Image: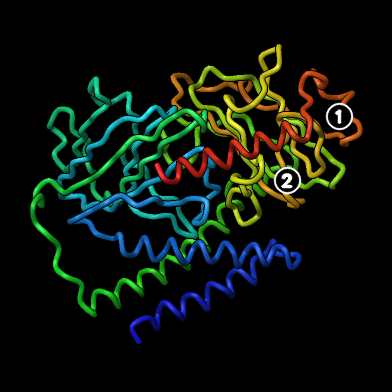
Amino acid sequence: MLTEKFAAAIAEAERVIAEAEHVRDEQDLVEGYDYLAGSIRASLQMAWAYERDFPFFVQSTGPYTKLGLDNPDTLYFHSYLRDDAEYVVTGTRGTTRDLSFQVLNGDYSPVDVPDSLTAFDDREIEIGPDGRYEIRFGPDAARPGYFTLGPGSAMLVVREVYSDWAHEQRGTIRIRRADKAGQAPAPPSRDLLEKRYGVAGKMLLSRLRTFLAFPKWFYLDLPVNTLTEPRATPGGLSTQFSSVGHYDLDDDQVMVVTVPRSDAPYQGIQLGSMWYISLDYLNHQTSLTADQARVDPDGKIRFVISERDPGVVNWLERTGHRRGYVQLRWQRLSRALEPADGPEVELCTVDELPARLPYYDEAKIAPDGFAARIAARQAAVATRMLG
């Protein structure tokens, strides 16, 4: 059968989910099977997008195809490359807070992170008055205004990052191989389709195993209910720092994360599940950017992570997840961050919060006000997905 290898990979993937170390109850397992569905969809999409002579951008992750503690504020796109060919990327710059490009020498695996061969943001390219730009990638290192594809270059990743979901507009982007304009790929054959189904199966298993291993590398050895100092994000993003941690909280406990409002154009925080994916950010406030959050008069932002509603604007909802991941990001930086730029963490109970949280009275919000914030999130993400 043409799909035999892919079907076998799905069966093995279900075993990977069922045997994951963090699974403790039925809800963990149900979420894992939901994650599996998105991973199947994404793996098929990626396998059919493995076209290096007639490339195109696909959305790498989204609300229904999550992986790798995906940032709710980011649209991720990728295309495959050959290191000996020239590619032309054209587009229009939207009004989002950041637009970055990264060339990788492979894909993530359960034992390795791919090397970043080139990483830059749109400050390094020429953008016309109408927002249009053109970037060329290829093997010739001597050409001006040309980004070199080093040996092993395999994938171009593009990230477009929002801070104000309601008002910022995404741009446009396309890619072509320079010497293939006007030509067409060969029609698919049975052998090609069989190969693609096999590749999709391999991608599925690698995807699941890799991002179940990731937290062991970067999170789970840290003391629980703490966050690291800001540090350059692993993986080579040239202008991003992050602070990471994992939490384990009772339902009446609160983790208060206090961080200065940064001068970085983008600053955000998010929660993730033990499957190493974002929590539901469409229908719950499980992430906030500096533009979405309340900033206190002392210039600090105080995020309140809890299961019970603490009645404050900067509540990050755990949505039933006793354990999970926390990540803060700063992007489009023009300087390295210091420990003083990073977060402080304090634990208390929900009942203690009014006495422990500075500016508590000013931060309060009524249930109907919070519901309005959720409605605005739902509308903004729906618009962004269709943009």
Q: Is residue 96 left or right of residue 228?
A: left
Residue 144 tag number? none
Whole-number angstrom distance, CA of label 1 to CA of label 2? 17 Å
At horizontal 51% and vertical 31% (from top left) the residue drawn is 166
Q: Amino acid at mark 2?
A: Arg
Q: Residue furthest top?
A: 297
* Residue 99, quarter of picture: top left
Q: Secondary structure at mark 1?
A: helix
Q: Where 55 falls versus 222 (above or below)?
A: below
User: x%, y% of residue 314?
Assistant: 71, 30
Q: Which residue is mark 1?
A: 353
Q: Which residue is mark 2?
A: 318
* Residue 295, quarter of picture: top right
Circle 2 Cα neighbour tier, 10 Å, few/some/many (<14 / 14–19 / ≥20): many
User: x%, y% of residue 379?
Assistant: 54, 40
Q: Secondary structure at mark 2?
A: loop
Of callouts 1 and 2, the N-terminal one: 2
At horizontal 65% and vertical 41% (from top left) the residue drawn is 286
- The residue nearer to you, when weighing 338 against 120, is 120
